[in-house]
Amino acid sequence: MPGLFDELRSPWPYGAFSFYTSRPRSRPPRPRNRPSSPAEVLERLLEGLRGQVIEVGSGNGVSFSHYPFGVDEVLAVEPNALYRRRAVKAAAMSYVPIEVVPGHANSLPAPNASKDGAVISLLLCTVASPAEALAELHRVLRPGGELRFYEHVRADRPFPAWMQDTITPLWQRCFRGCHPNRDAVSAIEEAGFEIVAIIPFMLSWARFGPIAPRVIGRAIRPESAR
Ligand SMILES: C[S@@+](CC[C@H](N)C(=O)[O-])C[C@H]1O[C@@H](n2cnc3c(N)ncnc32)[C@H](O)[C@@H]1O
């Protein structure tokens, strides 16, 4: 089965050094539907969302101005008080109503099946237990509701994955518990979500780093309970 990032493997001059080495030159050029800026990432992440939405680990509210009009209300859960204060300011500038509340991914302040959509952006790398966080997201989404995710992920080739494993102990000390080597996509599937769309890509500024391989995706909480 082809790896998530096969299409993106770069030709010279990066091939010899890149984590995602050597796409044969005969391959077609890189598809143009990859997001090329942080703002575009957020637009792609949130486009088409509707109804009641929960965003977990919303940080300083960087995503808020990208919520589309179809969203009725966003509950933004953020444990860090400083980020929350900034998020409240961002919420005041947003097109859609956004309530910023304290909370943790493993105990979300929302009833069962109460949300039409859930959003996570660079969260699963940081939480203590991705499985617990995803179980909570599964709980609060209604059957048929959508999880939108933007995460950096484990490389799909042995050498870069080994590099990520090697650097993780140091990296998580330097970057507030961030784990470059987590397989976020498998964790989402194992939590009972059905992935319906996924875009693997790399932001150019992160191309050589351990957090370079990224995905934006949509996953559904299936109608039949799992
Ligand atoms: C890398 S930042 C991403 C922030 C924002 N979502 C973005 O895309 O820029 C990770 C965020 O997750 C939050 N976070 C960390 N652990 C969390 C947890 N257990 N539950 C909820 N949020 C958490 C952090 O406070 C931080 O705001």
Image (cartoon, rainbow, N blue to C red):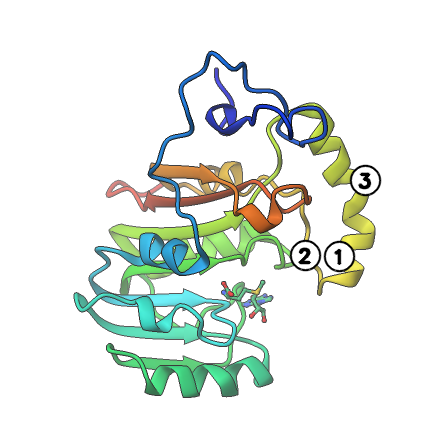
Image quarter for ligand 1 equals: bottom right
| Residue at screen point 26% across, 56% down | 47
Please name whichever residue, 147 or 9, is drawn nearer the observer in this view of the structure: 9
Mark 3 Cα-neighbour bin, 10 Å: few <14, some 14–19, many ≥20: few
Q: Which residue is mark 2?
A: 178
Query: x, y percentage for residue 223?
Result: 24, 43
Q: Marks 3 and 1, how far apart in space? A: 11 Å
Please name whichever residue, 60 or 190, is drawn nearer the observer in this view of the structure: 60
Task: Say whether residue 29 is left or right of residue 128.
Answer: left
Q: Which residue is mark 3?
A: 166
Query: x, y percentage for residue 84?
Result: 51, 83
Q: Which residue is mark 1?
A: 172
Q: Is mark 2 within 8 Å of ligand 1?
A: yes
Total labels drawn: 3
Question: Residue 74 sits in which quadrant?
Answer: bottom left
Which badge, 2 or 3, comes first in the chain's sequence? Answer: 3
Query: x, y percentage for residue 42?
Result: 38, 59
Which badge, 3 or 1, comes first in the chain's sequence? Answer: 3
